[in-house]
Each structure stands twice: as structure tokens, then as C-alpha cells.
Image: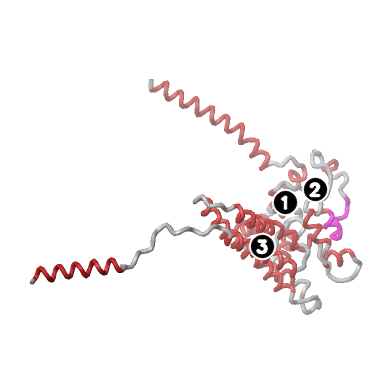
């Protein structure tokens, strides 16, 4: 009987492992090996020297730890130390969502040979001025907001001077999203006393991005209050609707930023903060479950006086 039980367990375990392998293996395969010859080929062009491997390892560790550093400095050093930009792409958000080379550069991603894969790819690098329209194919709201900005108008004109495009802030292959701690130094590259372009902008930009944390915090507080009240059977529909309005502001904030109108951006953030606070106020107040302790009234005083009188009469 014991052997039958053991053999049965072994058979069941083997079947479970087989089924799990059939389900998991395709997922792992799709994650680790993108069906794209660009990635397959360009992966082989990097990490050719020990010095290059060390630099890439440091970069990846920094990104994983959330350590912010000068994008421009490290991007330049990485370009000098590695012939291919695959290393930068491999640790980017684009790589995470499988946005591969062909999405921007064209070519045939399924071709097996270099010649066939590069058909349709222009000899020149993508012009910085056309990157908004190219990036806008996926980032539609951001493009719409950017087109209303003074940055875009300067880019569209033929005037001399700095005119930022998408790759100016996000870089072409590393695709970084700047944090509030990075934005001041980055904006200072153009907005400074030397160029004469409003040097107050960098600090204002940092403060504007930092205000998002307050919005996130207020939304979290309101959400907690709503969940608590709902668990106690309270009607929180009105509060939930107001909180959803605050959440929509937070969702749209990245797009709004690309308008590069700091006054408008701060107004939107403050609108979200007010909505979140209103949602918290709309949560039904908690009722008192314990009755307050009553102080002795006239009846209590009369009773105590009577007991004292009886005690004194007995003693006589």
C-alpha cells in the first residue's frame, strides 16, 4: 500500500511539473528571447572588453538601486566606451515593453541576414527635429501637449539657440524619465544666466515635480479612509467619485508636463490635491459606539445622603 501511495504521488507530481513547464516555458521564452533579429544581432556587439562590461554593470546597478546621476555625462561615456547602443536600450523602459529597434529605425525585424534586416533603414541618424512626430506615434497625449509648448515652437522654427526635442530630455536609447531631484540640473543646461534664458525655471520645475508627491499622498489618505468606511458598511459612492477625479489628474500629469507651462501644471496638481481632500471629507463620519460616562445627578446625591443619615441613626 505504501509503494502504491508513493508511486501515485510521483506520477501526480510529474504530471504537474509537465503541465507547469508547458504553461511557463512560452512565457519565459517570450521574455528572454524577443522574436526580433535587431536585438539578437546587436546583443553580440557589446560587452567586448572587461572595461565595457564593468561600466555596463555599474550602470545597471545604479538603475536598479534608483540612484540618480548626470544623464548627459554617463550617456557620453557609454557612447565612447561601447560601439553599440544596445546596452543602453537593454536597461530602458522600451526594452521592458519590447519596443525594439525597428519601431524607430525601420528595417525588417524578422530577417536572418544583416543586409535583409537593414533594408529601408536610412544611412543618416534620425534627425532630432522629427523625433516628436516619431515618438508621438505611441505617446499621443504627450505629443499633443508638447505641440502647444514654447519648446516645440522653437524646435519648429529655424532660429538659432537651444530647442529641446524628446531625445534632449529622455535620450535616444536609454529613454530616461527625469525625477524631481534631476530636473533642476538638467534644465540649467539651457536655462541659466549665461544663455539669458529665464534662469528661474530650473528651481520652479523641481518644485512643480515635487508637488506630485503631495498629490499621491492625499490620494492615498483618501483611499484608506474610503476603504475603512466601506468595510463598516458606509455609503462612500460620492467619495469614490471625487477620488476618481483626483486619480484622473494624477494619470494625466505626465502628459500635462510636456506642455512646459509650469503655472498650468501646478494648477492641475493643486486641483487634484483639492479633489483628494474633498473625497476624504465626503467619507461618512464614524458614529460613537461608547456612551460617555455620566456624572452623578440629583438622584445619586440624594441616595448617598440617605445612606449617610441611616448610618448615623444606627450609631446613636
Q: Earlier in the sequence, mark 3 or mark 1?
A: 1
Q: Label 2: few (<14), some or many (≥20) within 10 Å?
A: some
Residues at marks 3 and 1, CA–CA distance in whole angstroms: 29 Å
Q: Residue at x 50, y 25 (%)?
A: 11
Residues at marks 1 and 2, CA–CA distance in whole angstroms: 10 Å
Q: Is residue 198 above or below residue 237?
A: below
Nearer to me, 138 or 15? 138
Q: Where is residue 138 shown, x and y percent of the image?
A: 78, 51
Q: Residue at x 47, y 58 (%)?
A: 287
User: Which residue does the numbered mark 1 point to in the structure image?
Assistant: 94
Whether label 1 touches label 2, CB < 8 Å = yes
Q: Residue at x 50, y 29 (%)?
A: 13
Q: Earlier in the sequence, mark 1 or mark 2?
A: 1
Q: Where is residue 60 shown, x and y percent of the image?
A: 64, 56
Secondary structure category for the residue under label 2: helix
Q: Tell me which corner region of the image, top left, top right, bottom left or bottom right, holds residue 23.
A: top right
Residues at marks 2 and 3, CA–CA distance in whole angstroms: 35 Å
Nearer to me, 172 or 132? 132
Mark 3 or mark 1, whichever is nearer to me: 3
Secondary structure category for the residue under label 1: helix
Mark 2 or mark 3, whichever is nearer to me: 3
Q: Label 1: few (<14), some or many (≥20) within 10 Å?
A: some
For the N terminus, which image quadrant? top left
Colour basis: secondary structure
Tag of residue 103 = 2
Q: Where is residue 254 shown, x and y percent of the image?
A: 72, 59
The region drawn magenta spans: 122-133
Amino acid at each position: 500500500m505504501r509503494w502504491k501511495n508513493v508511486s501515485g504521488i510521483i506520477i501526480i507530481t510529474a504530471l504537474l511539473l509537465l503541465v507547469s513547464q508547458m504553461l511557463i516555458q512560452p512565457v519565459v521564452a517570450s521574455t528572454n528571447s524577443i522574436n526580433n533579429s535587431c536585438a539578437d544581432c546587436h546583443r553580440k556587439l557589446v560587452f567586448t572588453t572587461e572595461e565595457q562590461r564593468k561600466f555596463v554593470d555599474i550602470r545597471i546597478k545604479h538603475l536598479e538601486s534608483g540612484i540618480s546621476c548626470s544623464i548627459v555625462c554617463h550617456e557620453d561615456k557609454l557612447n565612447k566606451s561601447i560601439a553599440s547602443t544596445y546596452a543602453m536600450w537593454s536597461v530602458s523602459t522600451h526594452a521592458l515593453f519590447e519596443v525594439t529597434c525597428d519601431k524607430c529605425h525601420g528595417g525588417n525585424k524578422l530577417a536572418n541576414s544583416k543586409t535583409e534586416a537593414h533594408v529601408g533603414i536610412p544611412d543618416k541618424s534620425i534627425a532630432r527635429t522629427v523625433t516628436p512626430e516619431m515618438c508621438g506615434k505611441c505617446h499621443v497625449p504627450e505629443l499633443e501637449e508638447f505641440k502647444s509648448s514654447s519648446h516645440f515652437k522653437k524646435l519648429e522654427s529655424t532660429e538659432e539657440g537651444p530647442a529641446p526635442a524628446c531625445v534632449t530630455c529622455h535620450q535616444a536609447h536609454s529613454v530616461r524619465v527625469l525625477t524631481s531631484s534631476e530636473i533642476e540640473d538638467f534644465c540649467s543646461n539651457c536655462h541659466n544666466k549665461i544663455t539669458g534664458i529665464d534662469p528661474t525655471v530650473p528651481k520652479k520645475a523641481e518644485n512643480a515635480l515635487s508637488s506630485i508627491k503631495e498629490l499621491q499622498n492625499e490620494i492615498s489618505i483618501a483611499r484608506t479612509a474610503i476603504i475603512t468606511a466601506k468595510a463598516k458598511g458606509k455609503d462612500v459612492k460620492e467619495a469614490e467619485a471625487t477620488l476618481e477625479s483626483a486619480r484622473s489628474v494624477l494619470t494625466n500629469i505626465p502628459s500635462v508636463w510636456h506642455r512646459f507651462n509650469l503655472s498650468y501644471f501646478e494648477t492641475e496638481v493643486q486641483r487634484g490635491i483639492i479633489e483628494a481632500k474633498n473625497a476624504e471629507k465626503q467619507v461618512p463620519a464614524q458614529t460613537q459606539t461608547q456612551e460617555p460616562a455620566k456624572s452623578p445627578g440629583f438622584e445619586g446625591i440624594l441616595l448617598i445622603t440617605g445612606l449617610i443619615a441611616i448610618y448615623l441613626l444606627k450609631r446613636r
